[in-house]
Image (cartoon, grey):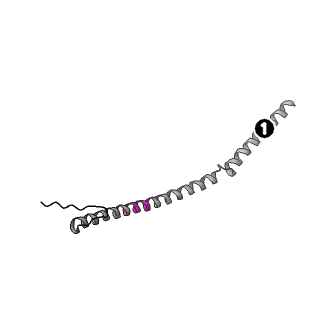
Amino acid sequence: MVQTVGKRLLLALLLALLVNFQAQLWLGRGSIPNVRNMQHKLEEQLDQNKLEQAHNERLSAEIGDLKEGLAIVEEKARMDLGMVKPNEIFVQIAK
């Protein structure tokens, strides 16, 4: 009789653990539906990051073009028009 009570108690304990693990698998924080949802959100975020990275690269290229463009304009103005900035001294050497 003691053995049957012990077996039933062990069986009940194992069944309770099985139910607990199944509940965590389907309903808990690390559940299969929750993991799928998080994977979907991750894919969306990675796609958004790619778009933002491309936008940042376009802005960086535009900044580089503006900096280079202004440097070329300034060089041209200095050489052809004799442009002098404030607090600069213009010295011309004849060859």
- Which quadrant holds the C terminus? bottom left
Instruction: Name the element at disc 1.
Output: helix
In this rendering, position of residue 3 left or right of residue 67: right
Position in image of residue 9 (x %, y %): 81, 36
Vertical position of residue 17 compared to residue 54: above or below: above
Position in image of residue 90 (x %, y %): 23, 62
- Which quadrant holds the N terminus? top right
Position in image of residue 52 (x %, y %): 47, 60
Q: Which residues are magenta?
A: 53-61
> In which quadrant of the rendered view does residue 70 lie?
bottom left
Residue at the spot 79% in from the left edge and 40% down from the top edge? 12
- Give amino acid for label 1: Leu
> In which quadrant of the rendered view does residue 82 lie?
bottom left
Q: Is residue 56 rendered magenta in the image?
A: yes
Residue at the spot 66% in from the left edge and 50% down from the top edge? 29
In this rendering, position of residue 10 left or right of residue 38: right
Q: Is residue 66 rendered magenta in the image?
A: no
Predominant secondary structure, magenta span? helix
Position in image of residue 2 (x %, y %): 86, 30
Residue at the spot 35% in from the left edge and 64% down from the top edge? 66
| Residue matched to label 1 | 11
In this rendering, position of residue 38 left or right of residue 27: left
Vertical position of residue 87 compared to residue 6: above or below: below
Q: Residue furthest top?
A: 2
Vertical position of residue 11 compared to residue 48: above or below: above
Disc 1 residue crowd, few under 14, some 14–19, many 20+, Cα 10 Å:
few
In this rendering, position of residue 55 left or right of residue 14: left
